[in-house]
Amino acid sequence: MAASLSAGAQHQLQLDVARFRNDDIAVKGGVVEVYATVAGKSLTYQKRGPKMFQAGATVTLEVVRPDGTAAYQETVTLKPPVLRDTTAVIKNPISFQKRLNLPDGRYTLRGQMRDLYRAGSADIVEQPLTVEFGATKPVLSDVMLLAKPASRSAVEPNNFMRNGLSLTRAAGGLYARGQDKLFFYTELYNAAANQPLTVRYRLRAAKATKDAATGQHTVQGADGKPTVLAGTLDLSRVPTGEYMLTIEIRNAKTQLLTTQTTTVRRNTADYAPAGAVMPR
């Protein structure tokens, strides 16, 4: 899920959300991963010394219950790298991720970004958030769009890893010039152990009658844990536009067990950022 923009507005703060079932199936609720990104080039740079300029921002994240009380609240300070020349265009965003355990229910996710060196500046993004993992039938988590393929990592577990895989998010579901591969990660719950499954995925523009890209592979249902699903789509012939990525899970009889969708944005004109700069 991603926060939508109001007509004519362009948020400096981008929130991407992915919901997963709690690893402890006895706990009613889910794990919500909030990935917050601030556009570095939109910030105000202040002189910090000879040929040294730096920007900064604070991001306050809140998860609010229907009665107005906060289920979670935290403020994070972000500072991009120091610049020697403020005329340089900083394309790299500044990002951080929070992993929250929330009971089943309906919430509002709110993010507020303030420029440290621009008085009165504020960018507020809100979106509804529903956590519900009580189903007993096969069901998919949210789909996480990745800038790089999910890969095994030897580093200590952190918020950017799930099931031993390192996951590099594609902020806002954007794949720009130079990014000719789409990568995704999702989890299938309640699949029968060792059941052969076909994972089909397709990319299609709104109102289009044909798919812009398709793929599929087979997996077996995991025993006593989520079935991890990761895949790749070739975007080299996909033009600029907004698309829906649909993932279907079918059994050996090709019966549809469950499906999930997410929005993908393709931009072949502008180069993608080199990568998010993590807070220090």
Image (cartoon, rainbow, N blue to C red):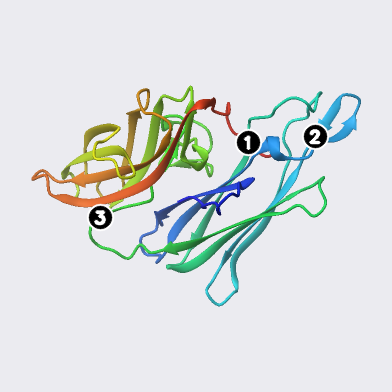
Residue for badge 2 = 54
Q: Which residue lies under the disc numbered 3? A: 190
Q: Is residue 58 left or right of residue 223?
A: right
Residue kind at label 1, given as amino acid type = Pro
Q: Are marks 1 and 3 in contact (CB under 8 Å)?
A: no
Q: What residue do we see at 24% from left, 45% from top?
A: 248
Residue type highlighted by circle 2:
Gln
Of tags 3 and 2, the one toward the viewer is 2
In percent of width and height, residue 93 lies at: 63, 36
Residue position marked by numbered label 1 in the rendering:
93
Image: 150 above or below 193? above
Q: Circle 2 — which element? A: strand
- Residue 163, numbered circle: none
| Vertical position of residue 108 compared to residue 57: above or below | below
Are dots 3 and 2 in contact, CB under 8 Å? no
Q: Quadrant of residue 38?
A: top right
Whole-angstrom CA distance, mark 3 to mark 2, is: 49 Å
Side (left or right) of 253 relative to 229: left
Separation of disc 1 and disc 3 at Cα? 37 Å
Q: Residue 229 appears in which quarter of the rendering?
A: top left
